[in-house]
Amino acid sequence: MNAPLSALVVMGVSGCGKSSVGAQIAFKSGGRLIEGDAFHPAANIEKMSAGIPLDDHDRAGWLERLGVEMQACIAEDERAVLTCSALKRAYRDKLRAAVPGLGFIFLELTREEAARRVANRPGHFMPASLIDSQFATLEPPTGEALTLTLDAAAPIGQLAEEVDSWLKLQGASTLA
């Protein structure tokens, strides 16, 4: 059995349900939700709103900030549940370096369903036109430690139950 998880990242392409699933996990486990999109600098939001994909340089400071936010949460004896695309292994490794014992929940979704969901999501800065760039950037976390892959098309409650079962297998009955 592994040591209890220090925090979780709910990851995947835009539209996969990170915010909804992360909120359910945080609620169910007593963890603190950290909405990754809320920490993008204005320049990143402007770029995405204009339909321009972010590159590694754009994401570097954002990922560093998310690591600091999770560290602060842990320092306050809270368990972080971060929503973050974490599309590349290098991005996940940067988060792992900031928070040892970090688990990842990968919400896997088809390109078609992601595009449908994003197109029907009012008021979000991420346009459906960027879905292809998300899939082009995505390096699925296959075989990475402390990672659970789930079908993002499943109901949110079912996904939260699957995460809870997985946490128990990892030696953490809850994140709280």
Image (cartoon, rainbow, N blue to C red):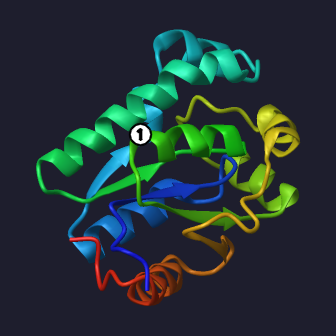
Quarter holding the N terminus?
Answer: bottom left
- Nearest the eye: 134 or 88: 88
Amino acid on which the number 1 mark rests in the picture: Ala
Seen in the picture, residue 10 relative to 38 is either above or below; the reply is: below
* Foreground pick, 1 / 33: 1
Name the quadrant containing residue 70: top left
Residue at 32%, 61% in the rendered image = 6
**Residue found at the far top of this picture:** 43
Q: Is residue 85 above or below residue 170?
A: above
Q: Is residue 33 left or right of residue 95?
A: left
The residue located at (65%, 75%) in the rendering is 150
Name the residue located 27 percent from the left edge and 74 percent from the top edge. 29
Where does residue 171 sit, x and y in percent of width and height?
Answer: 36, 84
- Is the residue 93 above or below the residue 165 in the image? above
Number of other residues with Cα within 10 Å of mark 1, as a class: few under 14, some 14 to 19, many 20 or more: some
Secondary structure state at the residue bearing disc 1:
helix
Res 94 → quadrant: top right
Q: Which residue lies under the disc numbered 1? A: 98
* Residue occupying the far left of the picture: 76
Image spot of residue 45 (x, y percent): 56, 19
